[in-house]
Image: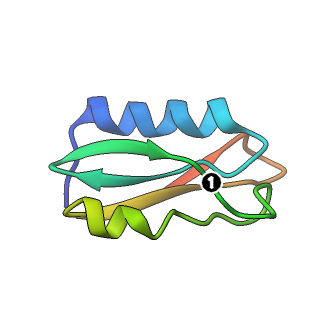
Amino acid sequence: MELPLEELRAIAFHGRYKAPEEACGIIVGGKALPCANLSHFPKSRFELDSELWLKHDIQGFYHSHRSEEHTSELQSR
């Protein structure tokens, strides 16, 4: 799946905004939708609300990774 540059920028912004916690979200209709990280350990893990799977036709999800070298490395699936 390829996302428009505007959506990739939105994902990167979300990762920087939520730092030092992991940012996460879903891809629906080619758009990135930020979601709450429900993990009890948000600095090292992410957890999405399971209701999202029932409410949306999810094409993919994303989440950020924390590292010593970078403020936010992002992985998109």
Q: Nearer the viewer, residue 14 or 57?
A: 57
In this view, the residue in front, 72 or 36, is: 36
Which quadrant would the C terminus be assigned to in this image? Answer: bottom left
Quickly name the residue at label 1.
37
Toward the viewer: 70 or 26? 26
Q: Is residue 44 left or right of residue 49?
A: right
Please say if 45 is above or below 43.
below
Judge left or right: residue 19 versus residue 27.
right
Left or right of 61 in this view: 68: right
**Residue 26 in the image, given as x and y percentages of width and height:** 37, 55
**Dot 1 lies on which element?**
loop
- Does the image show residue 48? yes
Quarter residue 71 falls in: top right
Q: Residue at x 29, y 69 (%)?
A: 54
**Residue 75 in picture, x, y percent from top left:** 49, 59
What amino acid is labelled 1 in the image?
A: Asn
Residue in the picture at 50% in, 37% down: 12
The quarter of the rendered structure image containing the N terminus is: bottom left
Residue 31: percent from the left, percent from the top? 24, 42
